[in-house]
Amino acid sequence: MKVARLMAVAALIAVPVASFAQAAAPAAAPDKNPVTSTVQRYFDRQKGNLAGAADAMPADKYNFKPTDGHITFAKLMEHVAKSNAFVCSKFADGLTAPAEIDAVKDSDGKDKLVAALKQSFDFCGQALAKVDDSKLGDQVDWRGSRKVPRAQAVVELPVDLADHYAAAATYLRLNGILPPSAQPRR
């Protein structure tokens, strides 16, 4: 009985204290770009994973491919850099991807490929910073002279990166290397 009364008193005290704490906390300003902010969070995670994968693969393994039907790891990194430049230029609203990204080739070696990959991530970060969610319905040029909503290009970025990272992680594991996303957290 005493325990029940003690619990009731504790509950009566806790409710006003919790209410006061909620009332005293300042309200967070609403995010004016919730879609782009969400894409930015996924982009940041995948950017870290892919850059980490590119760094983790030894230079002498950049020509590795699991089977004859697959592309090499170097070609995958080239593709990611060029894909980023293409996709982000579609929603960038006035930004142009650096020419060095388009010029990189899978035969250029690890250092140039990693540099182009990271440059493509920098470009996409700049492009995302310029996106205004109120313009996501605007039409942009896409593959094959099609027009699509800007939202499609924005959402395509983290989807592509997740797909590319899955491939890169597989290439790493086939070479006995633990992918960045599987590394123990510190």
Image (cartoon, helix red, strand yellow):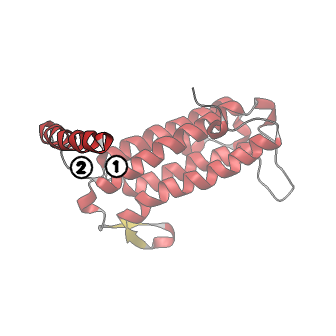
The spot of residue 110 in percent (x, y) is: 69, 32
> What is the x, y in percent for residue 87?
47, 56
Q: What residue type is labelled 1?
A: Ser
Residue at the spot 66% in from the left edge and 29% down from the top edge:
111
Answer few, some or many: residues within 10 Å of disc 1's Cα (few below 14, many 20 plus, some between 14 and 19). some
Location of residue 114 in the rendering, given as x and y in whole percent from the top left corner: 62, 34
Residue at the spot x=26%, y=39% of the render?
6
> What residue does disc 2 label?
31
User: Any mark on residue 37, and which?
Assistant: 1
Q: Quadrant of residue 153?
A: bottom left
* Sequence-wise first label, 1 or 2: 2
> Which of these two is toward me, 13 or 154?
13
Q: Kindly state the secondary structure of the residue where label 1 is placed.
A: helix
Crowd rating for badge 2 (residues with CA inside 10 Å; few <14, some 14–19, many 20+): few
Secondary element at tag 2? loop
Res. 46 in view: yes
Which of these two is toward me, 111 or 2? 2
Question: Which of the pair 19/176 is nearer the observer?
Answer: 19
Label of residue 149 in the image: none
